[in-house]
Image: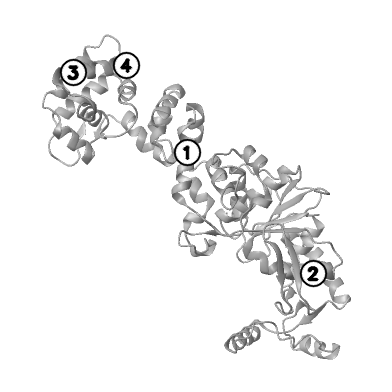
Amino acid sequence: MSGEVRVRFAPSPTGWLHVGGARTALFNWLFARQHRGAFLIRVEDTDVERSSPESERGVLDDLAWLGLEWDEGPDRGGPHGPYRQSERVALYRARADALRSKGAAYPCFCTDAELEERRRLALARGEPPHYDGRCRNLSEAERAARRAEGRPESLRFRVDPGAWTLDDLVRGTVTFPSGMVGDFVLMRSSGLPTYNFACVVDDDAMAISHVLRAEEHLSNTVRQLMLYRAMGLVPPRFGHLPLILNPDRSKMSKRTGEVSVAVAEYRAQGYLPGAMTNYLGLLGFHPSSDRELFTLTELEREFDIARVAKAGAVFDLAKLRWYNGHYLHTMDGAALRRAADAFLPAAARALPAERLERLLVAVRGNLATLADVASELDVFLDDAVVIEPDARAALAEAPADLLASIAGRLEALAQWDGERVKSEILAVGQERGLKGRALFHPVRAALTGRTHGPELPLVAELLGRERSVRRLRGAIQLESSDVQGAQ
């Protein structure tokens, strides 16, 4: 690949970071790192009414959480700044004036209401709703008269007829037929640029070599190619990434109000950044093997823009949970403690680090997200245990004196550890001809109020002798109420 690779992720700070945007940022980051290039963040904040500093901070924080460090951006500067479009308006106006001077753009005095009415009529006639060109050839006197009326004045690009062809890095050859696009606005009457114009000006000024973005931007590309030619510029290489779809194959849209499309929501639910980048990195990308687990560094080595799919990729929450569970189940205690910090109950925070880490390792196999940590630790932190319905059934099925016998033997143990606890339980089972589920389920139900969880000897070891014996004896006294606290 000739020349320096420079790519950008250009979010609009009008809300949270969409998982589709995160996937776009990830693919750009992987492409840049793979080619030892630069990854830029450019904030497209010309939508003044909807943009906010809070949204910008949220997007940048989510990107940093994912591990996608950027080389240039609004928070760290760089040689091609500023990196917010709201701070680059003078540059857009200068480029717009140059296009006007050479006759490639002209002032338009149509109001929004007039344009909308013409659009409605064109659609009713079955015609594409292009601008009808009524301001295209106004004389200077006619323009002066409209300014005197106080009509709004925007600047439109003069589209010449002709087809356009794009060699897309993902989709291959894409042809845009002549007449697909009418004269389009470059500068609004407010003095701010439109998306397509600002995008071209900035990508050129920031020396962007490759533009990797969502498929939905494909229709914008023909307008941008026109602008590059009109300004005498060489366009970057384009690659349009497949959409991310809901299970019903509808577009996973930022504006539907579904919180599940926000990266921040997955963070709040206790998903890990490594699980998210692993999943998103394979969403629409086919690695060279059937391997599914990749660190960010491994994805960087594996990524190949030629292996990005054309078809949309369905976002499968169950698959993401599988990835998250895998990473949680393989973390050591110290890593779990750091990752789970925001999800720990106060009683867990008060524990010595070594004790807490041992408990986290014990319960990690039951975690799907970090949000599960509190409920899984309850068994070890609370004096009382809530008996779940299936655990109550296991207790009801147990021989009447089983728990009493086990409690007596455990109370007399000379040394308390998991293996000795297991031996004593097995010994009682042998005396009564019990083993497996019939033996261990009632004990687990008494100790934890559940019929699932960490290995039972480990549970008893971590609970300690006093609490284990107390819970066994408490379960013997269990009455028939739905929820019972056993001391």
Sequence-first disc among 4 and 2: 2
Question: Gap in Å between the C-alphas at discs 3 and 2?
Answer: 84 Å
Helix, strand, or loop for circle 3? helix
Tell me which label, 3 or 2, sits earlier in the chain: 2
Q: Give, as a three-letter code, the residue at label 2.
A: Leu
Residue 375 appears left or right of 183: left
Whichever of labels 1 and 3 marks the residue nearer the N terminus, that label is 1
Label 1 near label 2: C-beta < 8 Å?
no
Please tell me whether residue 36 is drawn above or below residue 383 in the rendered image.
Answer: below
Farthest residue toward the front? 289
Query: Mark 1, mark 4: which one is toward the viewer?
Result: 4
Callout 4: 10 Å neighbours few (<14), some, many (20+)? some
Is 153 placed left or right of 95 in the picture? Answer: left
Q: Quadrant of residue 99?
A: bottom right
What's the amino acid at mark 4?
Glu
Q: Residue furthest top?
A: 414
Point out the image quarter for the C terminus. top left
* Residue indicated by mark 1: 342
Residue 192 seen in render: no
Q: How far apart are the alpha carbons under marks 1 and 4? A: 34 Å
Residue where numbered disc 2 is placed:
227
Q: CA distance from mark 1 to mark 3?
A: 45 Å
Q: Are the residues at dot 3 and dot 4 in contact (C-beta closer than 8 Å)?
A: no
In the picture, the disc for residue 419 is 4
Which amino acid is tagged 1?
Ala
Residue matched to label 3 = 430
C-alpha separation, residue under disc 4 versus residue under disc 2: 75 Å
Instruction: From the image, state whether disc 1 or disc 3 is nearer to you.
Output: 3
